[in-house]
Amino acid sequence: MNLKKESGMKDLTTNDLDLVFDKQNLECPAVVRERLFQGRNDISTDVWSAQNGYSWFVNRHDLYVWNQVSKLKILQFSLPTTGLPYSANSIAVFKKDRKAGVLAVSGEGCVRYWASLSSNQFFETTLDLSKEVVLSVQVLDHESSASPNSLLFLLSTTSGSVWILRADFQDGSLSSLKVGGRDEKGITRRLSSILFGSSKASMEASRVIRSLVYWRESEEVDQHNDSVYDPVALTLSSNTLQAFDIRGRALLWSYSNVTLMDRIESTLKRISMTEILDVRVYFLDIACFREGFLVLLGATHESANNITFFLAHLEGGDYTAPQLGWSSHIPISSSCSHHFDVMDESSFVGRVKLFVPQETGQSSTCERTDGVLIIYAGYVQSVYVPNDLGRINELPLNKMLLSSEKIIGESVDERYCYIMTNNGVVSALRLLPKGFEETGLHEVSFSDVIPDIVPENSKVDAFHKAYAHFAKKDIAKASALMKPLLSLKNNDLASLACKYLFNLIDQTDSDCLVENELRKKKRQCQGVILFLKQMDIYEKVRTGKVNVNGSPKSGAAFLAQMYEQVHIAVAIREWQTLTEDNDFALNMISDIVGKMYGVQGDADSIILGKLSNLSDVPRATLKAMEELSKKTCDERFVVLQIAADLFLAIATAITNCRRSTASVTLVPGEELWTGGSFADTFDALAITLLNELRSATLGRTESARLKDYAVRLTMFNLGERTGRIEGHPTLVALYTLGEEKIALDLAERFKDFKLLCRICLEYEKGLRDERLETYKKRFADDDFDIYLCQYLKNKNLNEELLEQKGERVDGFLSSLDTMRWRRELQNKQFDKAGRSLLSLADREEDDAWKQKAYYSLAKLSALCSENRDEEVISMCNEKLSQQAS
């Protein structure tokens, strides 16, 4: 199926769900695909449906039926000859006592009935429909009315008549009974026609487009005092909804679209923000929903360019007409609205359909369901009705999905709604967490991991079962199983989730290909994180504390580490399979890692199977490199290249993983798991590469390659650090090798202020001042100006320090006794300089000459002040006199 997402409309709720076509593993028979291909351009939109485990497809006068589960051979049946087209609604496939049969009705009312799908024998009868046209036929079956020897069907006509068909299994007979209908020949109808005339529009408005059956609890009880349920038939035309009591063969009530007019008109005025005239409202479809009915409507008005769709909830209706409750308009995108002509009601009446799975209709909330489904030939739409039906015009969720393949049939069961497109693909319409389809989680089998990861622990068992249902896209069941765990404290929940994921990805399956096992682990890792988010416990797990090797870390850090290690393993496997040298090197590395833990095995088991060992791979690689590099220059270059390629494969995997939308965000202030010794190995390898550049005679190509390796390894190392970088040794090495531009660029990027200061101070004064001023502005938030002052002070570059300007620099210098008076003299603050020098002289006890100089300068400063500080002058004279004596 060639699908495309519709992005033209704004979601009305959180954006964590996607409406998707979930392709079902149902093989479409070859003969059906052939018929679809032959009639691809003109095939109708209602030729396929499914029920009771069977699919059926109508093609002219041929009916094809096949079992969706057992995939038995396709069965073909000849339908009664008719001049009217058949639809999937003309067919009812039923199961009775494990036997399946089919009943078909032509538009004129010829009923053909096969008691068993395994037999070509059929029974046939013709109904006297008085020129009415059959709309649909459906099984009328309920546990309270089931008969062991017969089965009832409800037949509806487009004129509103309702019939009961009884199929007898013993003698194969068919009997019929008209329950009720609109009196087309009654006095009221004839008077209306005489007074107002009969038009095509009025006939079209009264044409029934949908019928359904619901069961109401009877006022009577059976002999066991149990409730009895009575069937009620609903018929819907574009202007009227009617209910018929099937047992009583009577019309219960009628409900006109006029009843909704005020509500619809008010909403149209609100959303169009203008006066509107000549509002026209059309019933489009109906479904049972929360002890009432959900009605899909369309509305237009005089100045409308597009149709406006609505959903309305009708409450009650068992014995009297229902009451209007909640309603809301249902926005659609412009790419969908062009399908409908406001001047031609046939473009939407009978073409836009509403489907509500039984569990959704009976639930008090749409959450964890796939919503209420609206289907047209070219798009599907899922809507959430609010939990509180008093919240009129509230729409918690509205999602749309376009299909470039024409939808040719629909079916609905207890839980899901399905469609078939004209390429023979059957899909369920699902609301799944964003990213679920990309994980491929549904392709993973859980049977092989259950014994190893589920010890005798009820919490782990519950978590696993919930996750398994989630992986099978059974979101509602997963949510129900998780409820008992939601009361756990954050730390306990984090520990449970993280240890569960750890067990999933840290086991080895010797019977599984490495690539397949890693692919499965990657999906599991993505799946667990998605599961935590969907169950609304992700933040609890993320911020909770998990004890790892005696030291606590956040759940986020633990999840991030596992998520990234899976991606590292995939990258290492890809690197390993590139060359035989890589494979040899990895097995040598795995031997070293194995010795660390006292285990034996190959790379597949020690490194790619036991993912918790991956953090030791860089350290083991350096050790292996030391052993292998004791060779000639050429051989050392190959060894260094192999090691660098492996390190960069790891670094790239981590970087790409963190850039993905599924990455785990760490708790603020927490260090990366790759910091410290893990990142230091990258720096160590970079230094080794640069030392090789210094000592070896390499060609231009080899030198450029080693330098590129060193730079990329250094970039990864710097990116993993959380503290301030101070003269990073690799950057310094690059600078001393003459790679000033590279060193400077990296120092700027990673804010190595020490190296920036060093490089700038080696420039000529003009360029030096220009660069330093640029950095002061660029890194103002990082206090570069103060760092520069401290650097100059430490280097005893006092003259350069005094050249720095600004209030912040003045403040820094004022904290330095030996520099404060010089800045004050620079600023011509002679009175302040005098007192600073006097204080400095008083504290100088080791050097009499220096003390005398301070007193002299203090006196001179006081004399230069506009307001001579006689006190300072007097004290200086006194001190100088004492020294002279």
Image (cartoon, rainbow, N blue to C red):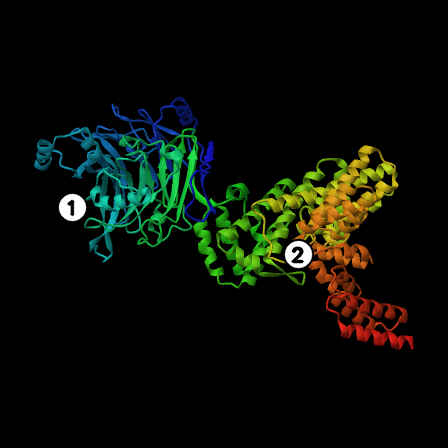
Residue 121: which quarter of the image? top left
Q: Quadrant of the C terminus?
A: bottom right
Residue 3 visible: yes
Rendered residue at 38%/23% (across/down): 39
Mark 1 falls on what kind of element?
Answer: loop
Of residues 462 and 379, which is closer to you in this image?
379
Q: Residue 671 carries which label?
A: 2
- Count of numbered labels shown in the rendering: 2
User: At label 1, which amino acid type do we have?
Assistant: Gly
Q: Position of residue 368 (x, y in %)?
A: 42, 50
Marks 1 and 2, Cα distance to the nearest angstrom?
75 Å
What residue would you read off at disc 1?
A: 248
The answer to whether residue 650 is left or right of residue 234 is: right
Q: Where is residue 517 in the image (x, y as percent from the top left)?
A: 62, 43
Specify which label sits upstream in the sequence, 1 or 2.
Answer: 1
Q: Where is residue 506 in the image (x, y as percent from the top left)?
A: 64, 51
Residue 41: which quarter of the image? top left
Instruction: Please tell me whether residue 126 is drawn above or below residue 809 in the rendered image.
Output: above
Instruction: Please tell me whether residue 676 is drawn above or below residue 120 in the rendered image.
Output: below
Residue contact at pointers 1 and 2, CB within 8 angstroms: no
Instruction: Please tell me whether residue 337 is drawn above or below residue 504 in the rendered image.
Output: above
Category of crowding for the residue at label 2, using alpha-carbon neighbours closer than 10 angstroms: few (below 14), some (14–19), many (at least 20): some
Mark 2 falls on what kind of element?
Answer: loop
User: At label 2, which amino acid type do we have?
Assistant: Glu
Of residues 120 and 20, which is closer to you in this image?
20
